[in-house]
Amino acid sequence: MTSVVPQKNVTDVDPRIIRTRELVISATFDLLVEQGFERTTIEAIAERSGVARSTIYRNWPNRAELFISAFEIMCSFTDNPDLGSLEDELRALGAELVSGLSDENWGQVLPSLIGSAAHDENLKSAQQEFSRQRRELVSEVFKRAIGRGEIAETFDPAELAEQFAAGFFFRHLMGFEPLDDDFVERQVMFVLSLTDHPGTKI
């Protein structure tokens, strides 16, 4: 069973509750990798984790919230440090996206999440919130660039974030093409060209 560490500060929570949540998240994580979202049930999670269904539902009101909790751990996305330039920060972001999408677990489960969310309103809502949070992290890079005067204040950081990240997901999910350093560099230069940022010539 995959070992996971809870992401929230739980120092004031009963250790037994923490352990129970770890068991459930680990079981969910493993089953999502093995079977995908549609085929993973609370019954299967309860059997794999050894935690009663009633206990699982006390911690997660519905299956979607539990799935997203496991998926967040599966594709954890670190805060983006201030590297002093938009170009350097975009390269770091691109490398992290490549690492995540190339990961056997995240890359394998992501198409299942997208497909399942189209038919499950709870999962769709949870997935939209998850995406919004990740988009905000990417947007911070462009907000800092505006603050440094690298790009004009007229640009929308959220739109630029989508422009940058979209190519990675399209290439992975639709084109089934490899993600590598050359692709990262092309995406960086493409987005810099949208902002009239000179960037480094390739």
Image (spheres, rainbow, N blue to C red):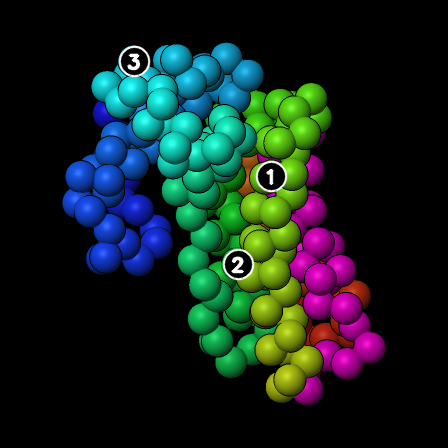
Of tags 1 and 2, which is closer to the observer?
Answer: 1
Residue indicated by mark 2: 93
| Pointer 3 or 2: first along the chain | 3
Of tags 1 and 3, which is closer to the observer?
Answer: 3
Judged from the image, the secondary structure of the residue bearing numbered disc 1 is: helix
Quadrant holding the N terminus? top left
At label 1, which amino acid type do we have? Gln
For this rendering, which residue is in front, 77 or 198?
77
Specify whether 2 is left or right of 191: left
* Percent x, y of residue 28: 38, 26
| Pointer 1 or 3: first along the chain | 3
Residue indicated by mark 1: 127
Q: Which residues are magenta?
A: 149-174
Decide whether the magenta segment is chiefly helix, strand or loop: helix
At label 2, which amino acid type do we have? Leu
Q: Residue at x 59, y 69 (%)?
A: 140
Q: Residue at x 68, y 80 (%)?
A: 146
- Vertical position of residue 169 compared to residue 107: above or below: below
- Residue 186, quarter of picture: bottom right
* Percent x, y of residue 47: 29, 13
Q: Residue at x 50, y 26 (%)?
A: 63
Specify whether 12 is left or right of 62: left
Between the C-alphas of marks 1 and 3, the distance is 25 Å
At label 1, counting other C-alpha atoms closer than 10 Å, the crowd grade (few under 14, some 14-19, many 20 or more) is many
